[in-house]
Image: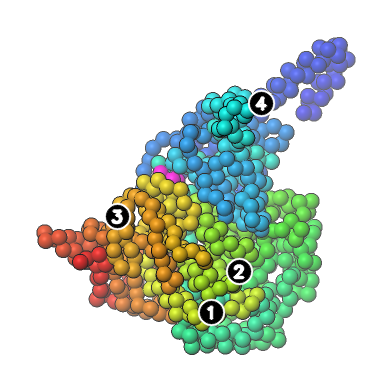
Amino acid sequence: MIVYHAMHYKIINTMNHRKMYFLSIILCAVLNASAQSIPEWKMIHPGIWKAVIGKPDAMTLLSIADATPNLEAMSKLPRGSFPLPQGEISMSVVDHKTYLRFPLGKGEQLYGLGLNFKNVNQRGKIFNLHVDHYNGEDNGRTHAPVPFYVSSNGYGVLIDAARYITVYAGTGVRTDAKNPPELMDRNTNKKWSARPYSDAVEILVPADGVSIYVFEGPTPMQVVQRYNLMNGGGYLPPKWGLGFTQRVPTLYSQSDILKEVQQFKEHAFPLDFIGVEPGWQSMAYPCTFEWDKTRFPTPQAFIDSLSIQGIRANLWLNPYVSPVGTLYPKLKPLSGSHTVWNGIVPDITIPKTQQILKEHFLKQHLQLGVSGYKMDETDGYDSWLWPDVASFPSGFSAEQMRQVYGLKMQQMTAGWFKEMNKRTFGLTRASNAGSSGMPYVIYNDYYDHKDFITALVNSSFIGVLWTPEVRASKTAEEWVRRIQSVCFSPMAMLNAWADGTKPWSFPEVEKAVQDVAQLRMQLLPYIYNCFAQYHFEGKPPFRAMQLVEGFRFSTKDQYMMGDQIIVAPMFAGEKTRTVYFPEGKWYDFYTGDFVGENQPLVITASLEKIPLFVRDGGIIPMVPPHFHAPAPGEKLALEIRHYGKIPASIELYDDDGISFDYEKGMHSKTQLVVTKNEKGELKGNMIRRSTDKVFSYKEDVVWKFMTAK
């Protein structure tokens, strides 16, 4: 532009103003034309194409996540060609902004575009993708505003920018639209709509350029698999992370917590890890990350006492450093220009900052045996966090830091545990693209039960995990229904930090609550298998029905747990609900009775049971009720259930459940096979590999054919 202005003034001296005016228009047109780009798509991984427009930012979402793609698993997925008409994709950079346009077909549905709580099909919505506390509206401000969408036509699009991205998901109509909406007269046509049909997704990125990824299917599930595998594959939690967790009240001391553990034993209730809330620190809001000497006088003895009982400790924190902590003087020169609750905001994109935090956390937490973290307050509100006018010593903008802070906290802390060869599983309030392989589950303070389930459905499109935690309930019925939902989610968590509720807080339903918690523990082999699929194949462990091939209905309040089980939660005040079954026959989990196929069905459910349904040929490995996840080397009896009438087989994955030794071959993959003889009788067989080094189950398995009459 400087050259242009120099030319401009030179021309004024030699031409009249009218000629200058027209020449200016021509020059501007030339400059704008140079900003236009016909994208060059290059296949960078099997079934994944990348294009670059302009000059992308040095820091992006994927660069922060820093994952290693699983190319071997990607190469096993079906292959086709570029899934969109390239000539209908347009890109340009104008005035330091990048404009993108992708075509949409008639009837095409869009999924993803962040962790949304109200709707599953996002077509016709406008989003400003912005890390924030969810505040009751699907507008892009959410805990994981992942700029990735999946089409029902079997492709996906990712925008890799740590920016506040605006997405018009089929709302804007251009004058040169290839498929313009029908012209209607509102005076006479009742079909007139203020939102006419749009044939495009248009995206505005406030940056000088961006990298874009397109994912091939051909099914929506395979799109999601490619996305997760590009980001290293989904995380495989430790087995104890899939047990039950109780988060204790804020100011509980170590003696209070040990008493609570004893209460869990007295009530015969499962417990695998305890969530220790802000009171463990000598100051919180902002934080010291150092133990309070009054409430926790002997942290090592406290951690050891839990460990002896088979229980881990997970520590709450937010990342804002208190002036009274020993970290403050070390991190002050490496922090942003603004404070949060009078605490400095460390610039965690700087290696020196990362090293200082690592040394502190190792000494204070990890080397004592702390199992993980609950990382709070990295999401919003705007009035709490650093403003967009803040600056950081790395030179990255406040906007960019807002979009990646929770993501970087996950990546950084996960690395510390991996260096110790220990798997962790924790909680985060903020995430973004690239986080499939992170050991964290998203949670928040919003508390609508039905919306929690919709969020669980939507999480499966964007490579994040979400838990519909329980905090409190108005009635015993609501208490049971909420507990049932969390027991069929990535993390079975009761969050009692505010009011001290216990699983048995409603005595009249204590047995029902205990039963569903024990059912989760019985299903741990199956659930662990689901997470193994997430890691090795990219399939979300808890997933939308829209990811099931052949599913033709619209629903947002039921989901799949793995390949075999439909979960259909009940909500307080409801005696019946509609369940939508995909193609094939489906059977009641509890009885083995046939219930339906490829149809909606109204069911009535008792308060004591969450409705569960298993596909024809479904094989469900289970263990007896137990109070902790199995320790390495522990052998549990295995009951293998088969549903329906058709032969089938699955692969049962296993490893030590605590370390990363499985990456070095220390795992097993056992075939569970059901065959049918000439008389039509079903028979089960477990086929072990001689090379398998780890197997946590007894050899004399029990086969149970649920549908056999």
* Residue at point 41%, 66% (across, down): 605
Amino acid at the residue labelled 3: Lys
User: In the image, residue 708 lies at what x, y percent?
Assistant: 21, 65
Examine the rendering and report whether any part of residue 263 can be seen: yes
Q: CA distance from mark 2 to mark 4?
A: 48 Å
The residue wearing badge 2 is 374
Q: CA distance from mark 4 to mark 1?
A: 68 Å
Residue 585 tag number: 3
**Mark 4 falls on what kind of element?**
helix
Please tell me how crowded label 4 is: few (under 14), some (14-19), or many (20+) other residues with Cα within 10 Å: few
> Is 626 placed above or below 20 here?
below
Marks 4,1: beta carbons within 8 A: no
Q: CA distance from mark 4 to mark 3?
A: 58 Å
**Mark 1 falls on what kind of element?**
loop
* Residue at point 45%, 36% (across, down): 83
Q: CA distance from mark 2 to mark 1?
A: 27 Å
The residue wearing badge 1 is 506
* Residue at point 58%, 72% (across, down): 473
Please state which of residues 273 and 654 is positioned toward the viewer in this rendering: 273
Residue 143 placement, left or right of 583? right
Residue 525 placement, left or right of 298? left
User: In the image, residue 573 lies at what x, y percent?
Assistant: 51, 65
Q: Which callout, 2 or 4, points at the residue further toward the start of the chain?
A: 4
Residue 265 placement, left or right of 20? left
Q: Main secondary structure of the magenta part?
A: helix
